[in-house]
Amino acid sequence: MLEVFFLGTGGIMPTRERNVPAIALRYKGEIILFDAGEGTIRQMNTAKLSPMKVDKIFVTHFHGDHYLGIPALIQTMNLWDREKPLHIYGPKYTFEFVQNLLNSGFFRPGFEVHVHELGETRLKFGDYEIWSFKVEHGVPALGYVFKEKDKRGKFLKEKLEEYGLQEGPILGKLEREGKIEWNGQIIRLEDVTGPRRKGIKIVYTGDTEPCDRVRLFAEKADMLIHEATYLNSDDRGESYHSTVEEACDTARRAKVKLLALFHRAFRYSYDEYAREASRICESLGMNFLIPRDFDVITFKSGSWELRNIMEERG
């Protein structure tokens, strides 16, 4: 199971109605942060997500609305006596900017902070990988892919019976080693399981104008979180951002299962944005979501569900 928490869904500046970008993925007990705008620690506390379970922060770029929450996160971790290292990943200049943050004020964390500057990279972490890819935003900027490893197919009852195998330690050994010798013959895992199941794939663009690399890396993703700052090109002007129509077109061409429109400009209320964005996405035949702060998407068994933390609490 994978949960995606939208901690901040707006862009440029926070408002009373929504915070600036921060997305938390909770997977097998670990929390992975993608961007951490100002106020992220408050949003995490509201969502009851512990910063002590965050080992990795992936920054898309160094505009303030995407990273100014990092110092508060680090100070909170320090106050709670964190000991394990924190890893911060980002594009070119990440090391310089993070060092500036750590050296500001009369404060140094009592734990190690490791900084990693990325290009287009594939990082492997146990049961998942993070891929970084370049986007177009006028400054060094990256998008990210969370890709869960593909899983074995389900054990087929009729095949187990055919080979005389039963549930228990022998199947555990077969799964660990990939093959076993049983009753004088070699049995491979694929002999008794169905087709492999694709791992979950989540793509986050950060800020970008329309970019072919997004379409390439988002191919057949379970969810594409694409910035759609503006409703139309007139509002966008000369900024390096995308419109709702451009985000929908990218998602359609990449054949993603679900599009989440992200980084709404502060000039739009949620209702105004949602009405027009819905009209555009529906006309293009996209399966889409316009998340609010504290929306949570849960991916499980090939399907997804939406809930909102604040609505659950009444």
Image: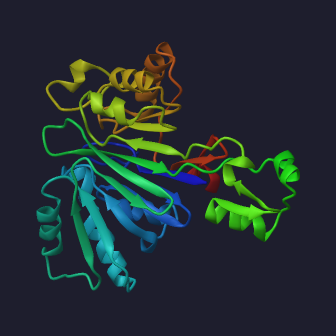
Front residue of 168/109: it is 168
Question: As drawn, which residue projects farthest toward the front?
Answer: 184
Residue 84, image x, y percentages: 37, 81
Residue 267, image x, y percentages: 29, 33
Front residue of 276/169: it is 169
Question: As drawn, which residue projects farthest toward the top?
Answer: 283
Question: Does 140 sit left or right of 112 as displayed?
Answer: left
Quarter of the image with the N terminus is bottom right
20 vs 285: above or below = below
Residue at horizontal 35%, vertical 29%? 215
Residue 118, image x, y percentages: 22, 54
Residue at horizontal 25%, vertical 45%? 142
Instruction: Find residue 76 and report its image quarter.
Output: bottom left
Residue at horizontal 67%, vertical 48%? 190
Question: Does 165 sit left or right of 44 as displayed?
Answer: right
Front residue of 5/182: it is 182
Residue 291, image x, y percentages: 48, 39
What is the number of callouts on the image? 0
143 vs 69: above or below = above
256 vs 180: above or below = above
Front residue of 17/264: it is 264
Q: Can residue 308 be seen in this view?
A: yes
Q: Can residue 22 be seen in this view?
A: no
Residue at horizontal 39%, vertical 44%? 9
82 vs 291: above or below = below
Instruction: Find residue 37 and report its image quarter.
Output: bottom left
Question: Does 263 sit left or right of 278 as displayed?
Answer: left
Q: Which colour scheme is used?
A: rainbow
